[in-house]
Image: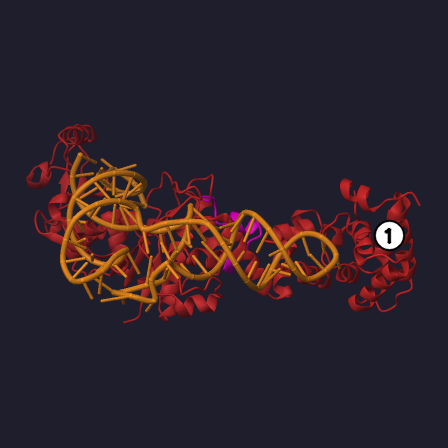
Chain colours: A red, B orange
RNA sequence: GCUCCCAUCGUCUAGAGGCCUAGGACGGAGCCCUCUCAAGGCUUAAACCGGGGUUCGAAUCCCCGUGGGAGCGCCA
């Protein structure tokens, strides 16, 4: 049997990291087994679904590299099929029209709640034979009244529900449109989904879905209900801590595989390993190893994981992702080789690509202002001899390479009888505008002779020379 | 309220009865390295929710609490 999994987000809100992790688990499981991964957009709620949300799903999945083999399917384009099954249920006596008004249902619910009972539809219309004039009925599924439903869940183990806890749920609204719990069942059955991996907020819906599936003549798939992701404060994920569009992470400079690596470790582990390539994730992941409890989103760890991936990445690859970050900061059309060189010298010094762009600006554009404290401390009378000597010595360098440049700087320090720091630090401020940069020799090399000398002279002028 | 789910350092987790004086990682503290910033190395503080069982032995199994979460919609 080939494994078929699906990711079925609803475009009523933006795709966030909780959804992404579910998608990742489904995708990994399918890939691990050489199966099929299906993307399906659950847009039956016309009122609340938005094109923008659909766009985020498509673009997000694309950015993350979680490619689907089938789809994307849209439930709104499958209405005829749902209608067909509803009619079939009606014909076979597995569903019935219900004429109860929303007000009546509301009263019923309130009474049951007041009586400390679970609110359930009481089945009033189950045996009704005549339509009620002037009422557009809904269609309800006839849920079994006794017995139990066993949900065999690979992460939770067996979970049993009593049918007496369930009621006859609405599968078609009075306007004829089908509802979620029903559509999922038809879709998963039609699409031959073998493993349903989804959030554990669906665990309670599962028994009624199994009942409908059984009525359809189907066999339940394997279920895997994964716990939700909490915010950093342990509270439910909200806009404040991470329920933002997944594309936000792209903007903030995270590598897709790093985000995925962080997310896969929420609920899953492989010994003490923290950093996984996509290939390793595919090779090692198993849904059965996912644990049951909810986990909190930790931005600090995400940042660390991102840095680990950046350190391992090829500079050329980093450059590709760095470019848009530079553009966002106003750098116009930088030369490719230069971007690669910058990515290479910065890749271990920052947590995100956005940060990389921010701290690398001096490689791409003129220094508009020196860091005030740095200039006061390093570009002063005391530094003048070093700056002058540097200007002179560097102007004579022909082979502008880090080793030679390192030689020059150390020689200047020796000649002046001071430590390397006394020379390198003023130079650093002069050419970068601040006190932090890659090692001085590589900074010099990447910057290029012309820019270095120009900046050095400006700094000497500023220092009052 | 009813039903279902969950429970190891602040956080992510290892742990499937003895290997646990509970391991790793992020974050924190300190030290080393060092031209700055990082990276890296070393050290350190920090947890089995509580109570009962079962067992020679329980973080691991069972029960009861407690705490958190979800569902109970003509939402998905």
Q: Quadrant of the C terminus of chain A?
A: top right
Task: Report the residue at 40% width, 51% height from top.
Answer: A19
Q: Secondary structure at mark 1?
A: helix
Query: What chain letter is assigned to the residue under label 1?
Result: A
- Image-based side of A99 in relation to A425, left or right: left
Q: Position of residue A201 (x, y in %)?
A: 29, 47
Direction from residue A293 to residue A257 in the image, left or right: right
Query: Is residue A22 at all visible to an observer of this figure?
Result: yes
Disc 1 crowd rating (10 Å Cα; few below 14, some 14-19, many 20+) is: many
Report the front residue among A36 and A426: A426
User: x, y percentage for residue A439?
Assistant: 73, 59
Between A39 and A154, the residue placed more toward the observer is A154
Q: How many marks?
A: 1
Give the labeled residue for mark 1. Answer: A456
- The quarter holding residue A407 reads bottom right
The magenta stretch is A242-258
Quadrant for residue A72, please give it: bottom left
Percent of width and height locating residue A454: 87, 53
| Camera-side residue of A228 and A119 | A228
Residue at (22%, 51%) from the top-left corner? Answer: A206
Name above or below for residue A347 compared with residue A465: below
Relative side of B16 to A336, left or right: left
Specify whether residue A452 is painted magenta. Answer: no
> Residue A457 placed where, x, y %?
89, 51
| Magenta-span inclusion, residue A248 | yes
Up-down relation of residue A271 to residue A80 (above or below): below
């Amino acid at each position: 049997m080939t494994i078929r999994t699906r990711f079925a987000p609803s475009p009523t809100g933006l795709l966030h990291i909780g959804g992404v992790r579910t998608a990742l688990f489904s995708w990994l499981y399918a890939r691990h087994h050489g199966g099929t991964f299906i993307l399906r957009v659950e847009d039956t709620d016309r009122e609340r679904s938005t094109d923008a949300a659909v766009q985020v799903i498509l673009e997000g999945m694309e950015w993350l590299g979680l490619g689907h083999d089938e789809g994307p399917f849209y439930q709104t384009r499958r209405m005829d099929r749902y209608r067909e099954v509803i009619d079939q249920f009606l014909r076979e006596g597995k569903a019935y029209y219900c004429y109860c008004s929303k007000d009546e249902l509301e009263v019923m619910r309130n009474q049951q709640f007041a009586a400390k009972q679970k609110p359930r539809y009481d089945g009033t219309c189950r045996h009704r034979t005549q339509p009620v004039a002037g009422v557009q009925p809904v269609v309800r599924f006839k849920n079994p009244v006794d017995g139990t439903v066993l949900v065999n869940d690979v992460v939770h183990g067996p979970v049993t529900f009593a049918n007496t806890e369930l009621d006859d749920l609405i599968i078609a609204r009075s306007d004829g449109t089908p509802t979620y719990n029903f559509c999922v069942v038809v879709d998963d059955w039609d699409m031959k989904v073998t493993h349903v991996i989804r959030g554990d907020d669906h665990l309670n819906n599962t028994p009624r879905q199994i009942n409908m599936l059984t009525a359809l003549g189907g066999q339940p798939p394997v279920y895997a209900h994964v716990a939700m992701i909490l915010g950093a404060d342990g509270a439910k994920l909200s806009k404040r801590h991470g329920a933002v569009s997944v594309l936000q992470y792209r903007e903030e400079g995270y590598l897709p595989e790093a985000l995925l690596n962080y997310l896969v470790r929420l609920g899953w582990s492989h010994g003490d390993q923290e950093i996984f390539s996509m290939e390793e994730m595919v090779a090692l992941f198993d849904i059965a190893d996912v644990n049951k409890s909810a986990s909190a989103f930790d931005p600090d760890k995400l940042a660390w994981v991102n840095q680990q991936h950046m350190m391992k990445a090829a500079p050329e690859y980093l450059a590709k992702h760095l470019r848009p970050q530079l553009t966002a900061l106003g750098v116009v059309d930088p030369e490719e080789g230069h971007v690669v060189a910058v990515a290479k010298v910065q890749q271990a010094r920052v947590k995100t690509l956005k940060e990389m762009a921010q701290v690398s600006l001096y490689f791409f554009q003129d220094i508009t202002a020196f860091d005030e404290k740095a200039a006061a401390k390093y570009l002063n009378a005391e530094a003048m001899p070093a700056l002058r000597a540097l200007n002179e010595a560097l102007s004579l360098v022909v082979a502008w390479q880090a080793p030679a440049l390192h030689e020059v700087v150390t020689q200047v320090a020796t000649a002046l009888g001071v430590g390397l720091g006394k020379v390198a630090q003023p130079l650093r401020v002069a050419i970068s505008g601040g006190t932090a940069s890659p090692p001085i020799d590589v900074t010099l090399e990447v910057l290029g002779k012309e820019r270095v000398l120009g900046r050095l002279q400006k700094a000497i002028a500023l220092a009052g020379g």
